Image: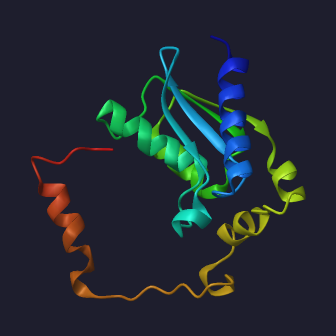
Amino acid sequence: MTNLYFMENAVEAALENAAAHLGGPFGAVVVKDGTVIGTGTNRVTSLNDPTAHAEIQAIRAACLHLQDFQLSGCEIYTSCEPCPMCFGAIYWARPKAVYFACTKEDAAAAGFDDQFIYEQLSLPLEQRSIEMRQVKMDEALMPFKLWEKSFSKIDY
């Protein structure tokens, strides 16, 4: 199997999803050792879930298949360059590679523009378009302190 074969799988999933009006025109597959172990399509509008992007759905399916929270040794093929949320999820999942077909500029031209999120990330809290403020409290660090002392924690 080649990169082109797996990319065709991701793009076909995006086409089918767009044709069925189940969400945005995005598809992704996770591959391990030459086998697709997770497929995802954008289901934001059909599930009323802003996190239901194709890459997230494919990562969830692959992790369930592997019974692991990381995608070590896996590759992700996605019909479009990942958005900031998916980018973060991909890094947490730790695959060995990501391949994409369309660029974020292609997505923006179709009405899916994430540039404002990249811009918001670089702004100080008080300048962001959504109010974000720290609420300080003495007990806030207690979960971290408990975690640090735990002998059964699983680092990720």
Residue 11 showing in the rendered view: yes
Residue 135 in the figure: left or right of residue 96: left
Front residue (pair 14, 131): 14
Instruction: Classify residue 67 as left or right of residue 110.
Output: left
Q: Residue at x 70, y 34 (%)?
A: 12
- In the rendered image, the residue lying farthest to the left is 151
Q: Quadrant of residue 141?
A: bottom left
Image quadrant in which the C terminus is located: top left
Give the vertical position of 9 relative to 109 (above or below): above
Kindly indicate the quadrant of the structure image that contains residue 77: top right
x then y, percent, for residue 6: 65, 23
Report the side of 137 relative to 55 (left or right). left
View extreme (top): residue: 1
Rendering colour mode: rainbow
Which residue is nearer to you in this view: 10 or 132? 10
Point out the image quarter for the N terminus. Answer: top right
Residue 135 versus residue 109 in the image, above or below = below
Q: Position of residue 98 (x, y in %)?
A: 62, 32
Q: Is residue 32 left or right of residue 78?
A: left
Instruction: Give the x, y percent position of residue 29.
Output: 57, 33
At a point 80% along the width and 63% down the height, the residue shown is 113
Q: Is residue 70 visible?
A: no
At 90% across and 57% down in the image, what residue appears? Answer: 109
What percent of the width, then of the height, locates residue 44? 59, 63
